[in-house]
Image: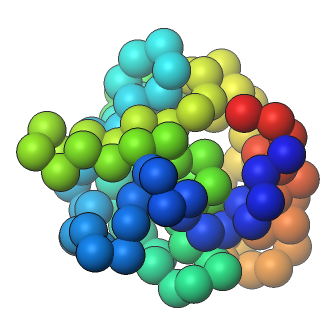
Amino acid sequence: MIENMWDYSPQAYSDDQKLDLVGFDVEATDGKIGSVDEENNVVGDSYIVVDTGFWIFGKKVVLPAGTVHRVDPQERKIYVARTKEEIKNAPEFDEETYREPSYRDSLGGYYGGPL
């Protein structure tokens, strides 16, 4: 289990990095899924919104910070510890509700399992 789904692990993204992640490419364990469209770095509520482009027909997905395995500032890439299929099957992104606690709870439940 992930200790806190909504915080970056120190191994993945340390406080001294704190980069603007918008525009970074995002890689699942089995390939690229898109690029960061938005980020939230509030402690205990950190996540990235990924624009998947043509991969899943222009949809966006929210990935809690706890899914991030590593950030590579030189390559401008974020590596997440989930497969494309896991990400594709996550709770549906809705532009109107993705910041609400109920959506966050459903994402936390979905991604809260073992890495």
Residue 51 visible in this rendered orientation of the protein: no
The image's colouring method is rainbow
Can residue 45 be seen? yes
Q: Residue at x 10, y 45 (%)?
A: 74
In front here: 15 or 32? 15
Check the image and report above or below for 55 versus 2. Answer: above
Quarter of the rendering containing residue 37:
bottom left
Where is residue 64 drawn, in percent x and y? 62, 58
Quadrant containing the C terminus is: top right
Name of the residue lying farthest toward the bottom: 42
Of residues 49 and 1, the one drawn nearer to the viewer in this rendering: 1
Instruction: State which quadrant residue 14 falls in.
Output: bottom left
Compared with 71, 9 (above or below) is: below
Q: Count all numbered tags in the image, as a single digit.
A: 0
Residue farthest toward the left in the current orientation of the protein:
74
Q: Position of residue 34 (x, y in %)?
A: 35, 36
Q: Residue at x 61, y 30 (%)?
A: 82
Q: Nearer the viewer, residue 33 or 68?
A: 68
Q: Residue at x 61, y 69 (%)?
A: 7
Q: Residue at x 40, y 43 (%)?
A: 70
Describe residue 59's horizontal placement relative to residue 4 as left or right: left
Residue 99 in the figure: left or right of residue 68: right
- The picture places residue 27, in percent across and down from the top left corner, at 39, 30
Instruction: Please state if 43 lies on the left or on the right of 104 as rendered.
Output: left
Res 88 quadrant in image: top right
Check the image and report above or below for 46 versus 84. below
